C-alpha cells in the first residue's frame, strides 16, 4: 500500500484522480444529486492539488521522479518524468482546477445550465489529460495526452448543442486534430532518424541525425500542433469561435488547459527536442518568433475593436500566449524562464478576467461592453478584480505579468534582439488600451432616466444588480489576489519562479 503512494507513483496518481472522477460522474450521471456530482469534482480537485504539491520539495532538490508504465518498442514507452518545467504547468493547472470547479458550480446553478453531468465529466477528463502533458517523459506519451485533451474539450465547446456551438466545435476539431496528426508524423520522423523520443533539456536532435534540409519542415510539423492550440496567427480562428461555450469553459480554454498545453508543446518541441542550437540553425525559432510578434500586434488591434467582452478577452489571449512563444524562441535562459513564468502570470490574470465576465453575464445578462455602463457601481468587487487583472495583463509593476515580461525583455536584450523587447513594451500599452476602457465604462455613473423613442423614462437598470453568488465571487477574488502577490513575491508559496529559472538553466546547460 505504501508503494502506491511512493514518490514515483505520484505523477500517475495525479493523472488518475481526475480520470476516476470523470468516470464516476459520467457513470452515476443523473442518478445522483447535483451535490454528489459537485462533491466528486471538488474531492478530486483537492486530491490532485495534494499530489502535485507533494512533489515540489523533491523537484526543487533536483530529485528525479520517473516511472515507466510500459514499453511499446525499444525507445518508445508510456512514461512520466517530473521536471521543473512540468511542475510549473502542473501546479497552475491543479490549483486553478479547484477554483474553476467552485466557480463552475456557482455559474451552473446561477445560470440554470443543462447537461451538467457531461460538463463536469469532460472538465475532469481535460485535467487528467493536462496532467499527462505536464509529466510526459517523451513525445509519444505527450502526444497521447495531447490528443485526449483535444477530444475531451470538444463536448465543452459544444455544450449548448445549438448550431453555433456545433459549428465552433467542428472548427475546433478540424484545427486541432489535423495539426495533431501532422505532429504525429513529425514524431515518426524524429524516431526514425534519432532513435529516441525522450525529452532532454537542450534537445537531442542534431544535424548529423536529421539533415538540415529537412529540419525546418520537421520543426514546423511538430510545433504546428502547439501553435494551433496556442492561437498563433494565422492558425487562431478556432479560439474566438469557441467562445460560444459557457464562461467556465472559456476560462478552461484560456487559462487552465488548452492554450497553455499549446504553449507547453511549443516549449517541449523547441527546447527539449530540437534544442536551442538546432532550432536556431534551421531558422525555425526565428520564423516562429516573428509569427509571434505579428500575432501580438494584430490580435491587440482586433481586440480594441471588439464590443463583446468575451471576444475581446479571446483576442487578448491570442496575443498574450504569443508572449510565451516569443520568449521560447528568443533562445536565452532569461527569456525561457520568463516564458515559463508567463504561463503562471497569464493563467491567474486571465482567469480572473473571464470569471468576472461570467459573473457579469449571470448577474446582468450583458455581453457587450457598451451595455455595461454603471455595472461597476452595482458590482464593485467584481469590477475591481477585473480592473486589477487588466492592469496586470498590461504588465504594470507589482503584478505577476511584470515579472514574466521583464525576464523575456532581458532575454531579448541579451540576445541582441531589441525589436522583440520593443514589441513587449508596445504590447503592454495596447493591452491597457483594450482592457482599461471596460473598467472606465463600468464605473461611469448610470443615469436614473434614459431617452426611449424621444421620451424620458426611468432607467430600469438603475439601482439593480449586486454581486454574483459567493461561489463565483470568491474564486475570482482569490485569483486576482494571487496575481498581485506573485508580482510582489514571485516565489511565494510554490516556488514557481525558481522552477522557471531551473528549467531555463537546465535547457542552456547552466549549473
Image (cartoon, grey):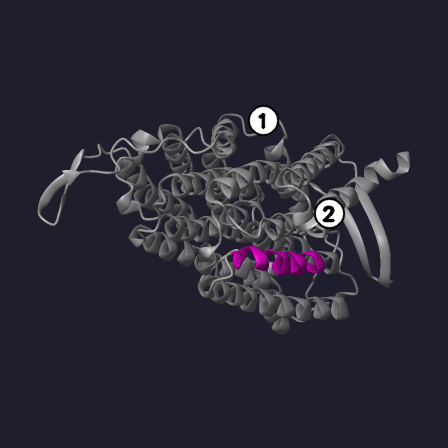
In the displayed orientation, state which residue is furthest to the bottom: 213
Q: Secondary structure at mark 2?
A: helix
- Locate residue 124, reporting x and y percent: 65, 47
Picture layout, residue 17 above or below residue 170: above
Q: Is residue 106 visible to us here?
A: yes
The reply, left or right, for residue 283 in relation to residue 43 is left
Q: Residue at x 86, y 56 (%)?
A: 70
Which span is picked out in magenta? 143-159
Q: Is residue 149 magenta?
A: yes
Which quadrant does the C terminus fall into?
top right
Q: Residues within 10 Å of mark 2 (few under 14, many from 20)?
A: some
- Which residue does the numbered mark 1 point to in the structure image? 492
Q: Of the residues tagged 1 and 2, which is closer to the observer?
A: 2
Q: Residues within 10 Å of mark 1 (few under 14, many from 20)?
A: some
- Locate residue 202, reporting x and y percent: 67, 51
Picture layout, residue 181 above or below residue 270: below
Q: Please name whichever residue, 259 or 139, is drawn nearer the observer in this view of the structure.
A: 259
Q: Are marks 1 and 2 in contact (CB under 8 Å)?
A: no
Q: Is residue 494 magenta?
A: no
Q: Is residue 511 visible to us here?
A: no
The reply, left or right, for residue 209 in relation to residue 485 is right
State the separation of the CA atoms marked 1 and 2: 35 Å
**The label number, if any, that marks residue 31 in the structure image:** none
Q: Secondary structure at mark 1?
A: loop
Q: Earlier in the sequence, mark 1 or mark 2?
A: 2
- Locate residue 68, reporting x and y percent: 84, 51
- Which residue does the numbered mark 2 point to in the structure image? 24
Q: Residue at x 57, y 36 (%)?
A: 102
Amino acid at each position: 500500500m505504501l508503494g502506491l503512494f511512493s514518490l514515483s507513483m505520484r505523477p500517475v496518481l495525479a493523472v488518475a484522480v481526475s480520470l476516476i472522477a470523470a468516470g464516476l460522474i459520467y457513470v452515476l450521471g443523473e442518478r445522483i444529486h447535483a451535490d454528489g456530482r459537485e462533491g466528486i469534482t471538488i474531492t478530486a480537485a483537492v486530491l490532485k492539488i495534494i499530489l502535485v504539491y507533494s512533489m515540489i520539495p523533491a523537484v526543487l532538490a533536483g530529485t528525479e521522479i520517473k516511472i515507466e508504465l510500459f514499453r511499446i518498442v525499444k525507445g518508445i514507452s508510456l512514461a512520466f518524468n517530473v521536471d521543473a518545467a512540468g511542475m510549473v504547468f502542473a501546479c497552475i493547472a491543479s490549483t486553478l482546477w479547484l477554483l474553476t470547479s467552485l466557480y463552475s458550480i456557482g455559474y451552473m446553478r446561477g445560470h440554470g445550465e443543462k447537461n451538467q453531468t457531461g460538463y463536469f465529466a469532460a472538465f475532469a477528463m481535460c485535467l487528467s489529460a493536462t496532467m499527462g502533458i505536464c509529466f510526459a517523459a517523451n513525445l509519444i506519451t505527450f502526444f497521447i495526452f495531447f490528443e485526449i485533451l483535444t477530444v475531451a474539450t470538444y463536448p465543452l465547446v459544444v455544450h449548448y448543442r445549438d448550431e453555433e456551438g456545433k459549428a465552433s466545435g467542428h472548427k475546433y476539431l478540424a484545427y486541432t486534430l489535423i495539426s495533431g496528426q501532422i505532429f504525429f508524423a513529425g514524431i515518426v520522423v524524429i524516431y526514425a532518424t534519432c532513435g529516441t523520443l525522450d525529452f532532454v533539456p537542450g534537445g537531442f536532435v542534431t544535424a548529423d541525425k536529421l539533415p538540415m534540409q529537412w529540419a525546418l519542415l520537421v520543426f514546423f510539423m511538430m510545433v504546428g500542433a502547439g501553435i494551433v492550440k496556442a492561437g498563433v496567427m494565422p492558425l487562431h480562428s478556432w479560439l474566438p469561435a469557441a467562445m460560444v461555450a459557457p464562461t467556465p469553459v472559456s476560462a478552461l480554454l484560456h487559462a487552465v488547459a488548452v492554450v497553455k498545453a499549446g504553449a507547453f508543446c511549443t516549449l517541449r518541441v523547441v527546447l527539449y527536442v530540437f534544442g536551442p542550437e538546432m532550432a536556431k540553425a534551421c531558422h525555425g525559432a526565428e520564423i516562429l518568433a516573428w509569427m509571434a510578434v505579428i500575432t501580438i500586434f494584430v490580435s491587440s488591434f482586433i481586440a480594441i475593436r471588439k464590443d463583446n467582452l468575451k471576444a475581446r478577452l479571446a483576442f487578448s489571449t491570442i496575443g498574450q500566449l504569443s508572449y510565451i512563444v516569443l520568449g521560447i524562441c528568443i533562445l536565452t535562459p532569461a527569456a525561457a524562464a520568463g516564458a515559463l513564468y508567463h504561463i503562471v502570470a497569464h493563467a491567474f490574470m486571465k482567469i480572473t478576467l473571464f470569471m468576472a465576465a461570467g459573473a457579469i453575464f449571470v448577474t446582468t445578462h450583458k455581453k457587450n461592453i457598451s451595455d455595461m455602463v454603471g455595472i461597476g457601481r452595482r458590482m464593485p468587487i467584481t469590477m475591481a478584480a477585473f480592473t486589477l487583472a487588466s492592469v496586470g495583463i498590461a504588465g504594470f509593476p507589482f503584478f505577476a505579468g511584470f515579472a514574466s515580461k521583464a525576464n523575456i525583455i532581458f532575454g531579448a536584450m541579451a540576445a541582441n534582439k531589441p525589436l522583440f523587447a520593443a514589441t513587449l513594451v508596445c504590447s503592454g500599452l495596447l493591452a491597457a488600451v483594450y482592457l482599461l476602457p471596460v473598467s472606465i465604462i463600468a464605473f461611469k455613473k448610470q443615469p436614473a432616466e434614459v431617452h426611449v423613442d424621444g421620451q424620458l423614462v426611468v432607467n430600469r437598470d438603475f439601482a439593480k444588480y449586486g454581486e454574483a453568488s459567493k461561489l463565483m465571487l470568491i474564486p475570482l477574488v482569490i485569483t486576482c489576489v494571487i496575481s498581485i502577490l506573485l508580482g510582489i513575491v514571485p516565489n511565494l508559496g510554490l516556488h514557481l519562479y525558481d522552477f522557471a529559472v531551473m528549467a531555463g538553466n537546465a535547457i542552456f546547460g547552466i549549473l
